[in-house]
Amino acid sequence: MTYDVVVAGGGHNGLVAAAYLARAGRRVLVLERYDHVGGLAISARPFPGVDVRLSRYSYLVSLLPDTIVRDLGLDLELRRRRYASYTPKGDTGLLVDNEDELRTAASFRSVTGGEADLEAWRRFYGMAARVAEALAPTLLEPLRPQIEIERLVGPQAWRDLFAQPIGETVEQYFADDTVRGVVLTDALIGTFADPATDLSANRCFLYHVIGNGTGEWNVPVGGMGAVSGALEAAARQAGAEIRTGAEIVGISPSGEVTFRAGDGEHTVNGRHVLVNLPPAVLDRVMGRPPEVPEGAQLKVNMVLARLPRLKDPSVDPRAAFSGTFHINEGRDQLAAAYAQAARGEIPELPPAEVYCHSLTDASILGPELRGRAETMTLFGLHLPARLFRKNPDKAREIALDATFASINAVLAEPLQECLLTAPDGTPCVEVKTPVDLEKDAGLPGGHIFHTDLSWPYAEKGGWGVETEHERILLCGAGARRGGGVSGIGGHNAAMALLTS
């Protein structure tokens, strides 16, 4: 059977591409190996008998452009978090309140002892906001050359965010170690790098501050599954055919796609094939030796019976945990953890951050748990896949113990005492290392971006989705400007076909 387009992989990007193309009258088939679509943008109930819909893998939305939401008529609510972040320091902490500038200023003074870093914070993020506003629209256009992007953002922003390592920039702007660390964490999510020397940290930082022209990280009401659910509905309503339980085992340059389903192997043909698979998986199914990237994070999903107490009684835990709660992420702590991991050791106190999405969206809790439980998502830094290869189970246990020790060091009580217990008597804790993501979710190296993030420009032009084969395009996170829950890879692959 022949289709105009076969989409290999039913993650959120594949659904975006399918919806755009089907709306344009193309005959589209989406093939997905799992029994559901959405890839890593899904909600799940991982704890038996506990009615909580956790965003199991991806967990916040920033990069999804309003343009895609409007174009596809998505029934989706993204809710802004009032508090950007809280960072414990000793018996106090730095609270960034999006709606109370005076409170934020007082918190900066308490932590840093003056006004200098607050003013630097305003200058730095003012610059980042201008870059976001200028750069975000270009992500949905053909790639521009570097010189155009340089002119677009201006010489200072180009130097500070693109040309010199972000670690140098942060050191030049800020004096306080805690403040430096808060900024640098955006350069290290899912990226194992030394921000003092490695420009890959700059690329990661850009992706975390330019989303939708604002850089805001929002909570999807209903969990991440609501995002993929809205995209699936849009694709089906437009006429796309979606087949789950269909694992891609071969793709040929001619557009022939072989997949394995419950009743054996099947072949379909596409005038074009849009690949929503990691580049290393594409290599494998095309018979090439894959280049496996390396992910670098620990994901811990939890349900709490109550929020833990803070060392600073003047801060409401509901405020501290509804934004990004930073744990041992000062600049020097990040550097020490990186050095330990680079030596092949699990960091003694892994830097991490947590988010309690149920404080922003209580609908992810079942009715009987609302007011009696909260979700907590932890994302740990500087834990690359290499640390878990030799003995995955033992390394996972060590990393979790170290991570609990890390967060307990900044709380007034052990987090373990706050965990909800499932009906079977086990605490509600789920741990995913990069090796787990590789095994359970099919991500080579456990890399959450499919491959290392790229600059949002290119001298050769195009849409950043092209491969060496004319009929095969990337449409996932591995496309240039892909990464994160954005739909940009899917949009751009669809536009590459519709505008050609």
Image: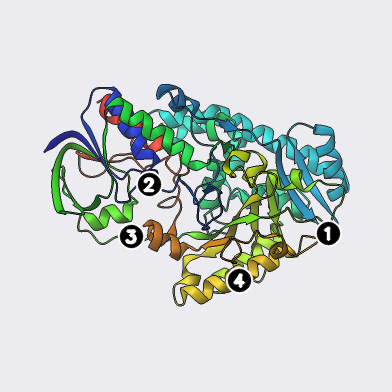
The CA span between labels 1 and 4 is 23 Å
Find disc 4 in the rendering and name its residue: 340
Secondary-structure class at tag 1? loop
Find disc 2 in the rendering and name its residue: 478
Find disc 1 in the rendering and name its residue: 90
The CA span between labels 1 and 3 is 44 Å
Secondary-structure class at tag 4? helix
Q: Quadrant of residue 121?
A: top right
Please determine whether, in this image, residue 115 is positioned above or below residue 239. Answer: below
Secondary-structure class at tag 2? loop
For badge 1, the amino acid type reads Gly
Q: Of the numbered discs in the image, which one, if any, rests on residue 291?
A: 3
Marks 1, 3: nearer the viewer: 1
Q: Is residue 419 left or right of residue 285?
A: right
- Which of the two discs, 2 and 4, labels the residue nearer the N terminus? 4
Q: Nearer the viewer, residue 431 or 132?
A: 431
Q: Of the numbered discs in the image, which one, if any, rests on residue 242?
A: none
For badge 2, the amino acid type reads Gly
Quadrant holding the C terminus = top left
Q: In this view of the protein, can residue 461 be seen by the observer?
A: no
Marks 1, 4: nearer the viewer: 1
